[in-house]
Structure formats: structure tokens, C-alpha cells
Image: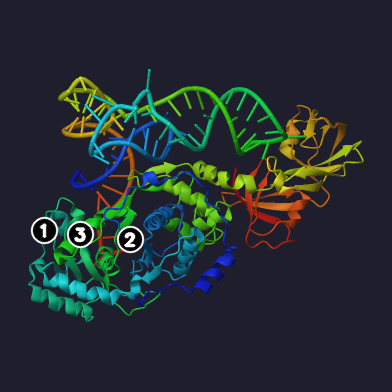
Amino acid sequence: MAEAAGLPRSELEDRLAALGGPEPEPTPAGRSTTGEFPDLPGAVPGKVVLRMAPFPSGVLHIGNGRMLFVNQHYRERYHGKLLLVFDDTVGSDVKRVETEFFDLILGDCELAGVRPDAVYYKSDRIPRFYPWARRVIERGGAYVCRCPQEVLRERRAEGVACEHRSQSVGETLDEWDRMLGNAYGPGEAVLRLRTDLHDPDPAFRDRVLFRISDIDHPRVGRKWRVWPLLEFSWAVDDIELGVTHVLRGKDLVMEDRMQRYLWDLLGVQGPPFLHWGILRVREAKVAKSKSYAEVKSGLYDGWADPRSWSLRSLDRRGIGMAAVREFILSFGMSLADIEVPAETLYAENRKRIDATTVRRMYVPTPARVIVDEYPSDLATTELANHPDRPELGRRTVAAGPAFFVPRPDLERCAGGEVRLKDLLNVRLPPGPWPSDGPIRATFTGRENRKLPRLQWVGTEGAVPVEILGLDGTRSSGIGERALAEVRAREILQFERVGFVRVEADWTPGASPLRVAYGHA
RNA sequence: GCUCCCGUAGUCUAGUCCGGUCAAGGAUUCGGGGCCUUCGACCCCGUAACGCGGGUUCGAAUCCCGCCGGGAGCACCA
């Protein structure tokens, strides 16, 4: 397969490095999900060939994850091959191919740990479809229709043939040659399949196989004017590329029928089809096209904006692809359309990162508190990096007498006694307090009593932090001294806030520390 | 409207092909309790489901019929 245009490995690695390097993500043992996936009909281990066909009009989002991971699952089960075939025929004015997405999608696959055995571009294959078209015509299976689009549509709905339908094979071949010979402009002629004009499914009546387009294709320009439609191109490529099983979303079931119809006509045996239903994450109310507009307009912070629910955005938030994979595979091959709360994904991720993620003190909306009669030996204190994992070590944090404490928590306890978590107890002055200037509290004791526990950060060496929220907004707070030593892309847990990940483009020492919020 | 698909607890899923071992299992959520100085983790306990109506059968989540509900497709997009 000379045209297998796999991206140079070094280039992929560079790109990955730009994303921050590969994640060591061990897949926990046990927990088999394979029972939920049926065997592929007639699958022979080592001989299975699968394919994924994204349309390059956006990055892969969590919904596309099903394509990625289900194919990967079966590829692993049968030690088969997985092809990535960009479905980049010309598209339309509303659905345009853009070059940047080829690389972005390749990067998404890499991020997901799904490495295709070969990469194809449909736009490179256009001339290969023409002989197949001729074969269909020669068998009387198609005709060149010159009806205007609206007329074609109306007649189809009514189940009425147009005058072109009665063409002889010879006439169709002539017309087809005229199409290829640039005798017609866009919209002036199409090659249509002859099915049954009374087919109960109106969508199936004499569908268009080829059309003429002058759109400037980002890869091949205007080299071709006669473009195949999806069903025809796949009817050919699933044969030519040796695909043994087609796994795709159920939005494409009608295309199965088209492909089978063409194969029957040509007398070839094509692969079986399997489908999965529509998967939606409740919180992710996104369409690919919407994200596209928001990114292009600058409203979104690039393709990894948390609002986009792209795979990149999940990675940015510290949600590992192993967790995403497990999450997606847990739905099996169900044809039902499902809507799942993101919490299920978070739970899956939490299982993987909780035990290895260090805890850090962070104070949102900080107020300054100064503690009178503060014990002189408590300028610093030592805390465990993880409450249940002594092997993660300890660190020394700066303590009083001056602290930052979350203002809303303080105000709730005005006039009362509270405990600064892990440290000591203080009595707060009665409110209300002025919004500027420190609040003066008084030391009352060290013993751990049942008092409201407040998060705190000693002012010495405290690190300003900016958190990117799920809604794309940024909020500021202040974190403990140890945060000065984090690395880009490190995952942390801010106690009582949640898991966050240091932004990939943050450089050590820069202020504020920028992190993306992951989940609780 | 037409075509196809799908209905198991709040949510997702196992079981349906080949009826009994399913008074329905798991995950997550929620509620209660325990524990660790996180609103997090862990442990224990609990709530909660076969869409409805007929039929076949000794026996139905599972087979048949009807209904209801939900979704997808119906482009010279992919």
C-alpha cells in the first residue's frame, strides 16, 4: 500500500512533546469489560482489518471517543490492524475540510494511545473510484441525471422517475465521460444509483453517487471536479483496503444498505457492519460545529477549551485517556442512545489518580488573618502529601502568624472559634469586618477539637494561583509555598477544591501559577 | 409523515439469541453510619428497575402480538 501516508514518527513525537509528553497511565488489572462486546462475525485473529473515518472539520471530542476506543478494543482482541482514513472528500460550504485538522486529529489519536497502522486520505484516492463507477454503469446500475437539485429532490419524494432515468448504458457512459471531461459545471449533472423509486425509505431512492464541485480542496486543490459521495467511496474503499469489519455509529445505518446494494450489484462480498448508539455526556452540550465557531472567533481558549469537551480538553484537565477509554468501553456496543453524567467519568479518573496525587493547600477568595498571641514555634509545620499514602512523603509549609483563609468560610464563623486545619484553633472577632485590611484573630489552643475546620495558607512565600474553570472562566486564589516547585502538566489535588492540572504552557516561576480545574 | 433502531433502579450497564440457577448482578449517584484533621479516599449499611396491555407456558426480563415512550436517518454533507 504505497499510499499509506503515515506521519513520520519523529513528527508525532514532537507534537506529543508539545502537548507535554506521554502519560504513564497503567491500566489497572482486573475489571474486564469484554463481556459487553460481542465477537465480530467471522473474525479470524491476526486477519482483522478495521478502519476509522473522521471528517477533518474539528478535533476529536468525547463523543468521537467511541470510534477510537471501540475500534482499538477489537483491534487488540483480534490482533488486527486499524486504519485511519480521513473522509476528506470536498464536503460542502457548511462542512468544509480544513488542513489543520489532519494533524490535530492525528495528535488526538496519539494522545488517546490509538496508533493507526496506516493513514489514508480519501482525497488522494479520487481517481480510483472512477473505474468502479464505470463498472456500476456498465451493469446498468446508474445514470447521469441533469435535473436541478430541487427537482431531483421533489421527484424522489414523489417516487417519480425523471427523463434521464431511462438512459441506455451507452448514453450513460457518454454522459459520464462528459462529466469527467468538464462539460458540466457544479450542480449540472450527477451520477445516480438506480434503486427502486418506490422504496419505502425515501432516502434510499436513486441516491447520488458522484457530483461536481469546484470547491478548492485544501490538499488537492481543484485537481478533481467529480467527487464521490460517502457511500460510494466506502463501498469501494472497504473492498480495496481489505476492511474485514466496519464499526461505526448508528447514524450511518442507511449507508450500510447503500454499500450492500452496490456490492450486490458488482458481485463482490463486503464486510459486515456493526454499530453503536449515540453517546452524550450530560454536561457536554456541544456540537463539533459550535466548538469550531467558538474557537475560530476566539471565544474559546483554543481546541482544549474545557467547554469543548474535546479529548485535548480532558487531558488538559488531568483526565487520563485510560479513564476515558474505560468509561467509554463500559457502554459496550449498545445501540441505545445514552446520556451519561460526567461524574461517571470523574469517578473512573479518580480511581486512577487519587492514590498518586499529592495534596496541596489552596485558598479561594482569600482574606488575610493575623493571629495574636501566636505560638512562636509554629512559624512552619510539616504536613503529609497524602493522608493515606505515607510513601508520598511530607513537606514543610509556612504557617502564621499571618494567614490567608477563605473569606466566605470566615464570615460564616464570625465571633466564633475555628480550627485552622492541621494546625491550631483561633477565636474570630465578631463581624462584620471591613473588606480591606487584615482580620485579627486570637490564638486559643492547639488541641484538635470538634470545631469548624478552615483551610489556610501561611502568607510567607504564598503563591498566587489562577484556576481555569469548566465554564472557561478564570478565578484567582492563593496556594501554599510548595506550589512554587510544581512542573507543567503536574496533577495536584487542592484540598476541598478538587483535582487540578498545571497548564502545559506554564513555566516554572511565572506568576500566577495557572492550573485547569479537573473535577472534585 | 416515511424508514430504521432502542426501552432493566436517578444514571449507565449485565442478563434477552438458547424461558427456570434472576424474589434480577455490577458501576455510579443519593441517604445513613464508621474512620483518617479535605467538601476527597477507604470501610459498612440502605433506598431503588424488567415501559404498558394481552397471549403462549407448569414457569416470561427472556418467546409472540398490540400499544406507549425515546432516538437516529430522510442532502449534489460526512
Q: Is residue A7 above or below residue A349?
A: below
Between A510 and A121, the residue placed more toward the observer is A121
Residue B69 figure quarter: top left
Left or right of residue A136: residue A229: right
Q: Nearer the viewer, mark 2 or mark 3?
A: 2
Q: Is residue A438 above or below residue A223?
A: above
What amino acid type is highlighted by mark number 2?
Answer: Val
Q: Earlier in the sequence, mark 2 or mark 3?
A: 2
- Cα separation between marks 1 and 2: 43 Å
Do callouts 3 and 1 point to residues on the same chain?
yes
Q: Earlier in the sequence, mark 1 or mark 2?
A: 2
- Cα separation between marks 3 and 1: 24 Å
Q: Residues within 10 Å of mark 3 (few under 14, many from 20)?
A: some
What amino acid type is highlighted by mark number 3?
Answer: Arg
Q: Residues within 10 Å of mark 1 (few under 14, many from 20)?
A: few
Q: Residue at x 62, y 61 (%)?
A: A504
> Can residue A417 be seen here?
yes
Quarter of the image containing the N terminus of chain A?
bottom left
Residue annotated with mark 3? A260
Q: Residue at x 79, y 30 (%)?
A: A448
Left or right of residue B2: residue A338: right
Quarter of the image containing the C terminus of chain A?
top right
The chain to which mark 1 is attached is A
Residue annotated with mark 2? A48
| Secondary element at image label 1 | loop
Residue A160 is tagged as 1
| Secondary element at image label 2 | loop
